[in-house]
Amino acid sequence: MSAARPGARAGAPSGTSPLVPGLWAIVGFLVAVELASGVLQGYYTPIFSDIADHLGIPEGDVNWFEAAQLMVSALAVPLLARLGDLWGHRNVLLVSTAVTALGSWMLAFSPGFWTFLVGWALQGAYVVWLPVEVAIIHRRTSATREQDRLTRRAAAVLVAALEAGVIVGALTSGALVEATSMPVLLALPAVAVTLCFVVIWFGIERDPGVATGGYDFRGLGLLTVVLGLVMAGLVVVRLEGVGSPWPWLLLLAGAAFLGLLVRVEAATPEPLVDVRLLATPGQWPVQLTAFLFGMSVLGAQIPLSTFARADPEEVGYGLGVDAATVSTFVGVYVVTMLVGALLLPLATRLLGPRGAMVGGLLLVALGYGLFLPLHGSVTEMLTNLGIAGLGSGLLVAALPAAAAAAAPPDRTGFATGMTNATKTVGGAIASAVFAIALTATGSLDEPGVGAAPLSGYLTVWGLCSGSALLAALALLAVPRAGAPTASTASAVTHTTAAAQAPHR
């Protein structure tokens, strides 16, 4: 990475280095933010079992934290992205960082399940950081003829910082969990996020909003109702059981409001959710694939952690490893995801764009399918995670490109953003379903300590594998003309390779 050459000017011919005063200083400040983002995404995974013990809840109920956070994230992306255009991206970055810091501090001082659940949900506001940061860089380079190239280079640096933060976070929590108290351990990410707020306040220049028009609050409200009813139905299944009529009534109500959302958005000039675009032959298979893929890439992290930490002498399954070993699992998974993302251009040349995505899904299905017979050793765990990680990396990089290629030029941002939103919703629903599958004792009213049954973990892995296979079938409906070109796929690899790893 070279600095801008002194004396170069904005708008210089291609091949020269345009002068963008302060660009890489801004990137440096944003790198600090992405390091904190990576820490949040990697820090908690090795210590989920310790968190369950600290709160006095079954390990299966930890999945409700993930479900709540992913639902908040699914709503935060369209809301904050639009507000960034209207209000200014720096302002949105500050607000989302403040909300994330509040949630992080709540985790450190939470006395029980419900306050921890609220804090964990609020922490999900950080999901908008990377898209907003890329928007800040894109605006900062708007006066040059190399805007796209500079944005890609800066985004690649941010993604690398995110990856580094994930690994640092996982290794740090795994090393400190036995050396300090849980409140102190949980306070460390809160300190990092709070420092990020200071970095943004003093390091990032103010930017005015540039968009005109209003915001589709009606669409946001309906989307909130739909997601809320679906999650409420899953919670009631957990509390009352599948024999109760209430959860099914809530789920039916969610479906009814989904139909209303579709009708309202189809008649809205500037909709929050462009349902007409999503219904096109090139879009719906890609978005359905993102939803199904989210079940494994976002929903399976907690079960993998709690299974690895389980003591086989006490519960009859598990590896009985410590948090430090789980940190190694996280590191292997993140590294293989990055390798998979970097292999996307080669896979596209060999198999074609659609074939590369199908190949990635088959690797995910194989990796999680291998957990069904092979889950009794660290070697088996690492092998399975490595296979699933390679496939996941291919998909994280390929899905936004596939959506962009099947969208008109003025809707590519929406299409690529929707792959993230649908993936997040899939992960949220999967987390709730997995929480039900891993139920052992206790309830959300009176949680009690208990080990999940092995059959619950087998269900989780089976659903992850099966959802990947269903997604592979869905992709067969993508018209060949709607698939991304190899150059398009390569262009987005750097900006999307790790935006969701290991849990976003």
Image: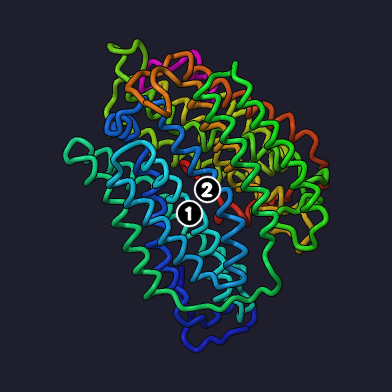
Local SS, label 1? helix
Q: Which residue is mark 2?
A: 72
Q: Earlier in the sequence, mark 2 or mark 1?
A: 2
Report the amino acid beneath label 1.
Ala
Q: Could you say which disc has been placed on residue 258 in the image?
A: none
Residue, far left: 179
Residue, far bottom: 7
The segment highlighted magenta reads 367-379
Q: Would residue 45 appear left or right of 276 to someone viewing this image?
A: left
Q: Would residue 451 appear left or right of 177 to someone viewing this image?
A: right
Assess whether residue 422 is covered by the magenta stretch.
no
Placement of 182 over or under 80, stated as above or below: above
- In the rendered image, residue 116, in percent from the top left (x then y), is placed at 36, 41
For this rendering, which residue is in front, 69 or 371?
A: 69
Q: Which residue is mark 1?
A: 125
- In the rendered image, residue 221, in percent from the top left (x then y), is placed at 65, 52
The span from disc 2 to disc 1 (Cα, nearest Å) is 7 Å
Report the amino acid beneath label 2.
Val
Q: Residue at x 61, y 55 (%)?
A: 492
For this rendering, which residue is in front, 134 or 269?
A: 269
Q: Residue at x 65, y 54 (%)?
A: 220
Mark 1: give few (<14), some (14-19) or many (20+) Cα within 10 Å: many
Do callouts 2 and 1 mark residues in contact (Cβ within 8 Å)? yes
Q: Residue at x 55, y 24 (%)?
A: 237
Q: Across the whole image, how many numbered discs are drawn on residues?
A: 2
- In the rendered image, residue 205, in percent from the top left (x then y), is placed at 46, 78
Name the image quarter holding residue 423: top right
- In the rendered image, residue 445, in percent from the top left (x then y), is placed at 41, 28
